[in-house]
Structures are given as C-alpha cells and as structure tokens.
Image (tube, helix red, strand yellow):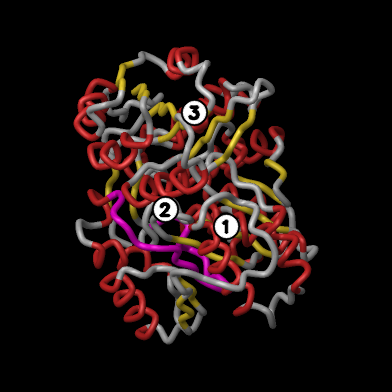
C-alpha cells in the first residue's frame, strides 16, 4: 500500500458518516491493545479556541523538554497535521503502516456497525503516540465531548474552552444542552479548567464538576498578568493562553514547568489559520481566519477593527451551509468595501449567491460579487493592500495551498468531509 492508497482508504471510511458514541472506539482500542492505557492526556473540548489552547499547552510542555503528542481536527491541508509528535507531522510511512494494521482490525466489525473515519483515526493516533512513548498527549475532541470518540481516555486534566452555538443539530439547541455535551469529558476526581463565561453554560459545567467531585478552575474572562509575550494574534488568545496556564498550574506536581519554559512556550507557539497574517514581498497583507460560527466571527471583527483600524480592506468569504451563515455575513460584511463570496470545497458549502444577498443586506455600500472559485477571487483582489479570507477552516486550507504556503495535498483536504451524523447509545 502506498501513502496515496492509504489516504484513499481513509477517504472511503467517510461513507460510514459520523457516529456520536464511544462503543466502537472502545472496541477498536481493545483490539489494538489499549494504547490509551500507556499514555497521559490533557483532554480539551469547547466551541471555539480548542485548537489554540491545545497549541499553547503543547508548546509549553515541549519547551519543558517533554515528548508531546498533539491530536487535533480538522486539518488544513494534509491529513498528517492531525497527528503530531513534538509538532512534527506523522511520517507518511507510519500512516501507511497504521492504515494497513487497522484495516485488518476493522474486519472484526459487522458491516452495519463499522467504525467511522474519525473513530479509526482516533485509535490510530493513540497507537502512534504509544509507540512514540509520548510523555503527554494534548487530546482535542472532535464533535461535542460526552459521546465523542476521543472520550475513551482518563486524562490528567479536562479542559473546556468556552460554550457557544455551533453544531446545534447534534449537540442541542440551547447553551445548557451544548454545555452538558462538552462537560461530558469531565471524569470523577480529575481536575477541570474552563474559560466558559456564559452564566447558564457555566452553571452546567459547575454542576457536572460537583457531581463528579472534579476540582474546578474558572479562568477570568479578561485575564491579566500573563508571563511574557503571547505570539498568537487577537485579544481572545490571551484568554486561551490563561486557560492553558491554569492547566499547567493544576498539574505542576505531576509535570513541573518553570516560569521561563512557560514564557518560551507562549512566545513560540504557532497555530496556522487563526488570525494568521501573511505578508507578501510587494507589501500586501493577507489575514486568514477560520471564523466559522457567530462567536469566532465576532472575535475576527473585533481583531480587525483593533489592529487595522484605518485600512482599506477586501473580504473573501466562504461558509458551510450548515453554519449560521446569515448571521456570520451580518457580522463580517461591514468590515470591507469590497466583498467576494466563494464556494467552499465541500458538499456542504453555502452558495455564494446566498452569501452575496446576506452581505449586501448587512453592508449596502459595499461592492459585493460572486466568484466561482477562491482562485478567481484571489486574482480579482490582487491590488488590495489588506485582504481578509474567512468563513471556514476548509477555505483557509485551500488559501494556504493556493498562496504557496503548503505543498499540494488537495485530495487530503477532502478527508474533512463527513456525511450524516448518527447518535448511538454508549
């Protein structure tokens, strides 16, 4: 099997959609020899900021000399981004080897209860991290928490970044319901830290923590006194950094980290596609941000208005159709005098025509036009000094590829796709 064939095999697993439940993941982990039992985890859930908080934690512990594992999703361009050791992507030959191993294990499942792409990749990651003898694994949930495939581990600490509206069709239509699903990663007696501040959501987290006798740390909404410089752009990243520091503090006895190592970790952290500013040789600036829900769009707007107050801006916008695209357009359209709407490379894309209508309603003075591709939109905005590309992480991955910041891996971006979501009891 070649690497390309391995990716195609994983691509085929999308036919099994996504399942909310841990039964299959437990069984597959058992068949693989329970690699999760040989590892230490920090489990991270939340609506926004999961990836950035994971990046802060990984950077700090790597600066402390630990062999870190990092599991996140979705990937921007390459599937290998999902599984990293000390921020090095899993090698292609290891993907091939693990796919061959797990293809054999999957024969133990009946066809009507076949593991999904995410379930298989979750246990593949566990197996790889155990092989690599990682000291600590920063372990991000996929969808939700309680019934997420990642929720088969007992971590050193649980982390809930915040609670907002996203994936309501699966997690619930109120903040309390969403908070309950996210709080499902809290384990009996295991410390939990959160930066959630919406009162109803926070009350649910507090209640679950109390029921499970899990010591709870609540991070202030406007943290002060962070040691050193936070390298990621945006005020909200200070909050994500403060949440990571709260976890480091709680685990100080198990994993000692010095103040200098914390400062180095904050200063050197990298997390592409989140308020990422690219500067081209001719002086053009391109701001990339995967703002895909109302809360993250609000953060993007605040950051742009603060950091680029006097700039003439152009906006390229592509959003998935199952997101709150009308509200996102309403938040972001006032940022720019020129707006170009594009399709996202996904079966779930909202049509550019729909986005155009919503943007015109939100910013009647702007020039709003439809483009049939991101490539076309980039060409049309070439003279602009400041370009913002946003609406979906899928779009950001495509932009990084087109702008030459990633080697081509188009077929791998499609692995982010999934079909129906089915809930199974666990």
- Left or right position of 338 against 272: left
- Residue at screen point 34% across, 78% down: 208
Question: Which mark sits nearer the N-terminus, 2 or 1?
Answer: 2
Which is nearer the N-term, disc 3 or disc 2?
2
Find residue 233 and report its horizontal and vertical position in percent.
57, 49
Camera-nearest label, 3 or 2? 3
Q: Which mark is residue 24?
A: 2
Total numbered circles: 3
Q: Residue visible at 31% across and 50% down?
A: 166
Q: Secondary structure at mark 2?
A: helix
Residue 39 found in image quarter: bottom right
Pinpoint residue 7: horizontal percent, then vertical percent: 56, 29
Q: Position of residue 135 (x, y in %)?
A: 72, 64
Q: Which is more toward the observer, 5 or 331?
A: 331
Magenta-drawn stretch contains 153: yes
Residue at the spot x=28%, y=60% of the render? 425
- Please report the bounds of the magenta region as a residue range: 148-167
- At numbered mark 1, what does the secondary structure look like: helix, strand or loop? helix
- In this rendering, is residue 30 above or below 271? below
**Residue 349, numbered circle:** none
Chief SS of the magenta region:
loop
Q: Residue at x 37, y 64 (%)?
A: 182
Q: What is the crowding at mark 1: few (fewer than 14 residues within 10 Å), some, or many (at least 20)?
A: many
Above or below 59: residue 186: below
The residue indicated by pointer 1 is 54
Numbered label attached to residue 387:
3
Residue 320 placement (x, y as % from top left): 32, 33
375 part of magenta stretch: no
Nearest to viewer (mark 2 / mark 1) = 1
């Amino acid at each position: 099997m070649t690497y390309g064939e391995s990716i195609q095999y994983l691509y085929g697993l999308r036919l099994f959609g996504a399942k909310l439940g841990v039964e299959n993941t437990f069984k597959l982990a058992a068949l693989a020899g329970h690699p999760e039992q040989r590892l230490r985890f920090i489990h991270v859930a939340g609506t926004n900021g999961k990836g950035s908080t994971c990046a802060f934690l990984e950077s700090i512990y790597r600066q402390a000399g630990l062999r870190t594992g990092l599991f996140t999703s979705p990937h921007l361009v390459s599937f290998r981004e999902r599984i990293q050791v000390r921020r090095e992507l899993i090698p292609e030959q290891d993907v091939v080897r693990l796919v061959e191993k797990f293809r054999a294990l999957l024969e133990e499942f009946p066809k009507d209860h076949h593991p999904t792409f995410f379930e298989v990749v979750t246990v593949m990651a566990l197996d790889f991290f155990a092989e690599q003898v990682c000291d600590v694994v920063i372990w991000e949930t996929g969808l939700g928490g309680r019934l997420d495939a990642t929720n088969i581990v007992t971590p050193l600490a649980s982390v809930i970044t915040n609670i907002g509206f996203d994936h309501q069709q699966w997690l619930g239509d109120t903040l309390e319901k969403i908070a309950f699903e996210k709080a499902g990663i809290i384990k009996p007696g295991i410390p939990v830290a959160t930066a959630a501040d919406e009162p109803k959501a926070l009350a649910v987290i507090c209640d679950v923590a109390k029921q499970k006798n899990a010591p709870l740390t609540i991070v202030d909404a406007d943290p002060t006194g962070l040691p050193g410089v936070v390298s990621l752009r945006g005020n909200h990243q200070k909050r994500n950094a403060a949440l990571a520091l709260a976890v480091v503090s709680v685990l100080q006895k198990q994993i000692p980290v010095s103040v200098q190592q914390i400062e180095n970790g904050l200063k050197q952290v990298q997390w592409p596609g989140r308020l990422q500013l690219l500067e081209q040789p001719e002086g053009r600036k391109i701001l990339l941000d995967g703002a895909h829900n109302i809360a993250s769009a609000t953060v993007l707007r605040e950051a742009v208005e603060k950091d680029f107050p006097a700039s003439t801006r152009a906006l390229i916008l592509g959003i998935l159709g199952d997101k709150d695209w009308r509200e996102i357009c309403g938040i972001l359209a006032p940022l720019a005098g020129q707006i170009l709407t594009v399709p996202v490379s996904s079966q779930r894309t909202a049509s550019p025509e729909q986005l155009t209508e919503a943007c015109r309603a939100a910013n009647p003075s702007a020039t709003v036009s439809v483009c049939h591709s991101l490539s076309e939109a980039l060409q049309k905005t070439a003279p602009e000094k400041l370009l913002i590309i946003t609406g979906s992480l899928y779009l950001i991955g495509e932009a990084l590829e087109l702008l030459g910041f990633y080697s081509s891996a188009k077929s791998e971006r499609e692995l982010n796709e999934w079909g129906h979501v089915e809930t199974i009891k666990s």
